[in-house]
């Protein structure tokens, strides 16, 4: 027995030293994510092996905690906790009359909390430090009169990247959905590159940044953000950021009347909007840019469906239909349909610049007129 204890202590010394080394790297902001991932994986595997070995004699024995009444905890909750945070799937299936071990579930939840905190610390340490001028601009991110042009100047034409990073971090969506920082940076770089594909004066990455900030402001100022789930907030910000991706600088009618490739692909229906969605989601096919890699299948399907509905609703031809639909929802006792409400909110943010301060509105109007005249010249 003494020899077994000695061996266990010896094997535990290595993960302990690795953890302390990782903590030191995090404190000094010198994070090697590949090394961090390997160390965490190794430590988790070893701790799991020690835990299983230590509890093996009691797996088939009666646990005194089973006698506790747990009527306040629904069966589906305990089952979910066990399946999410333990390796139960790798073990032989339990008999239908067996119950999950309460103590093992508590330990699993504690381990999950620990991993969550480690991820947050690692993510925060890896976030790029912003210059003082950028930080100063971002102080007004919650305001209706936010100057996206000023932000774009101080961050050297990376307003969309800077603003999306800031909002994802503020809402803590990065840690909630385990978004890898390397994937996020890669995705945003590709996104900005796509927005500059046709060098549009108006439908550019700066416009996307403006719409994303405006949507955030609407969610915050109206209190709607408290009505939404975290996944719906993530989907809304993502939809705003991609809503004009690879815009050609021409209208849907232009594509239809010139019989463009886009018009033929999308059958003359919301031609530009359909392409924005398709092209943006195609970016996620690259594993190095897939910011949703850690979403569950159910989360992914819900997010994708909401993003598609929201971006398609930015088609100006659906404006009156949307307004009528929302008026109808408000008159019903069932209340407002979330996807329809969020779709109208994104559409509102997309055409909101006439309600902004004159300095911003006049600049957007000039850019839009320049783009219109390019189309007819």
Image (cartoon, rainbow, N blue to C red):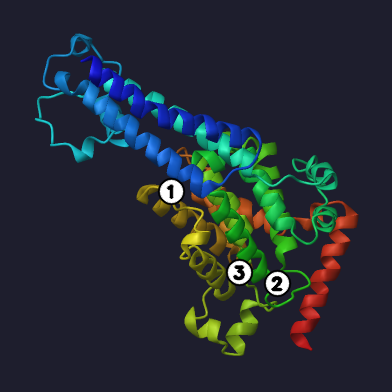
Q: Residues within 10 Å of mark 3 (few under 14, many from 20)?
A: few
**Sequence-wise first label, 3 or 2:** 2
The residue beneath circle 1 is 294
Q: Is residue 223 left or right of residue 9?
A: right
The residue beneath circle 2 is 196
Q: Secondary structure at mark 1?
A: loop
Where is 322 relative to 69, above or below?
Answer: below
Is residue 210 visible to the viewer in this orientation of the structure?
yes
Q: Residue at x 71, y 69 (%)?
A: 203
**Sequence-wise first label, 1 or 3:** 1
Q: Residue at x 54, y 64 (%)?
A: 312
Q: Residues within 10 Å of mark 2 (few under 14, many from 20)?
A: some
**Sequence-wise first label, 2 or 1:** 2
Q: Nearer the viewer, residue 59 or 266?
A: 59
Q: Is residue 282 left or right of residue 123?
A: left
The residue beneath circle 3 is 317
Where is 270 relative to 241, above or below?
Answer: below
Q: Nearer the viewer, residue 5 or 213?
A: 5
Quarter-of-image position of residue 167:
top right
Q: Secondary structure at mark 2?
A: loop
Q: Residues within 10 Å of mark 1 (few under 14, many from 20)?
A: some
Q: Residue at x 67, y 54 (%)?
A: 348
């Amino acid at each position: 027995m003494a020899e077994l204890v000695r061996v266990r202590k010896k094997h535990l010394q290595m993960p302990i030293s690795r953890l302390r080394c990782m903590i030191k790297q995090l404190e000094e902001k010198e994070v090697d994510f590949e090394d961090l991932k390997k160390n965490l994986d190794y430590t988790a595997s070893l701790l799991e092996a020690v835990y299983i070995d230590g509890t093996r004699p009691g797996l088939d024995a009666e646990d005194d905690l089973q006698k506790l009444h747990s009527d306040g905890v629904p069966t589906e909750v305990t089952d979910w906790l066990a399946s999410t945070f333990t390796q139960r799937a790798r073990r032989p299936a339990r008999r239908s009359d067996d119950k999950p071990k309460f103590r093992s579930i508590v330990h699993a939840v504690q381990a999950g909390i620990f991993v969550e905190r480690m991820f947050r610390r690692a993510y925060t340490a890896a976030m790029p430090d912003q210059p003082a001028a950028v930080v100063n601009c971002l102080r007004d991110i919650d305001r209706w009169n936010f100057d996206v042009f000023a932000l774009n100047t101080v961050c050297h034409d990376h307003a969309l990247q800077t603003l999306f990073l800031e909002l994802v971090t503020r809402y803590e969506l990065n840690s909630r959905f385990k978004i890898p920082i390397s994937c996020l940076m890669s995705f945003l770089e590709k996104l900005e590159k796509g927005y500059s594909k046709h060098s549009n004066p108006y439908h550019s990455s700066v416009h996307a940044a403006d719409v994303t900030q405006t949507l955030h402001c609407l969610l915050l100022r109206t209190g709607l953000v408290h009505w939404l789930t975290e996944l719906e907030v993530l989907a809304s910000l993502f939809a705003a950021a991609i809503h004009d991706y690879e815009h050609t600088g021409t209208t849907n009618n232009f594509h239809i009347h010139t019989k463009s490739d886009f018009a033929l692909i999308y059958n003359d229906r919301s031609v530009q909007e359909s392409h924005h969605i398709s092209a943006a989601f195609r970016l996620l096919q690259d594993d190095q840019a897939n910011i949703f890699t850690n979403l569950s299948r159910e989360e992914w399907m819900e997010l994708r469906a909401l993003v598609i509905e929201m971006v398609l609703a930015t088609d100006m031809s659906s404006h009156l239909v949307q307004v009528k639909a929302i008026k109808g929802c408000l008159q019903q006792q069932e209340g407002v349909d979330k996807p329809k409400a969020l779709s109208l909110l994104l559409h509102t943010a997309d055409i909101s610049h006439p309600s902004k301060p004159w300095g911003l509105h006049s600049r957007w109007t000039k850019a839009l007129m320049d783009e219109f005249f390019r189309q007819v010249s």
